[in-house]
Every structure is written in C-alpha cells, then in structure tokens.
Image (spheres, rainbow, N blue to C red):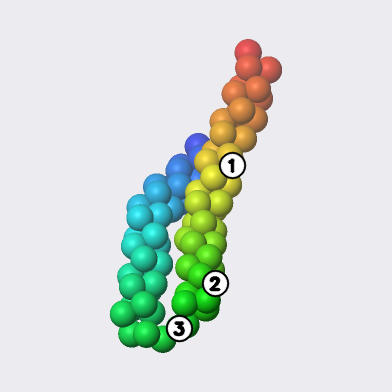
Amino acid sequence: MIYVGIACFGLSLIFQLITLPVEFDASRRALQSIENGGLLADDELVGARKTLRAAAMTYVAATAVALAQILRLLIIFGNHRGSDD
C-alpha cells in the first residue's frame, strides 16, 4: 500500500513540476497584457507585479510540500521496512 501512496505523490510532484513553468508564463503574459493595455497606473503596476509573482510562488510552495511528503513516506517506509528484518 505504501508503494501506491508514494506513486500517487510522485505523480502529483511530476504534474506540479510540469505546471510550474506554465504558471510563471501565465503570470508573465498577464503582466504584459496589463502593461500593454494601459490598465493600471505605474504605482498600481508594482502591486500587480508583486501579486502575480506571489500567485506563481504558491505553485513553488505546493511542489516543495509534495517533495517533502514523498521524502517523508520514503523515510517512514525505510524505517518500517528495516524493523521487519
């Protein structure tokens, strides 16, 4: 059963790694659209840039959590397996 859990978290991690560049590109394109469309004043643009960067960083955090979860499962499984011998 632990192999299924590790595999599921592994798939989640792969998906998140694929999603990272997509999200950063989406934030970049959104900022370009805002700038090119003249939708915000210069002082508002600074806030929009920070907000879009923070939105992209949530994906980085989720990827780090998924990696930590996989490592946690591997450590638990390794310790458990060693005690069975």
Q: Nearer the viewer, residue 55 or 48?
A: 48
Find the residue positioned furthest to the front.
42
- How many angstroms separate mark 1 from mark 2 (CA)? 33 Å
User: Which disc is residue 69 wearing?
Assistant: 1
Residue density around tag 1, few if under 14, some if 14–19, many if 20 or more, within 10 Å? some
- How many angstroms separate mark 3 from mark 1 (CA)? 40 Å
The quadrant in which the N terminus is found is top right
Tell me what residue is drawn at x 64 percent, y 30 percent.
76
Q: Position of residue 41 (x, y in %)?
A: 47, 82
Residue density around tag 3, few if under 14, some if 14–19, many if 20 or more, within 10 Å? some
Q: In this picture, is 77 found above or below 33?
A: above
Mark 3 vs mark 1: in front: 3
Q: Position of residue 53 (x, y in %)?
A: 49, 62
Assign a secondary structure to mark 3.
loop
Q: Earlier in the sequence, mark 3 or mark 1?
A: 3
Tell me what residue is drawn at x 60 percent, y 23 percent.
78
Q: In this picture, is 14 found above or below 71?
A: below
Q: Position of residue 9 (x, y in %)?
A: 50, 46
Residue receiving disc 2: 47
- Left or right of 35: which side holds 40? right
User: Which disc is residue 40 wearing?
Assistant: 3
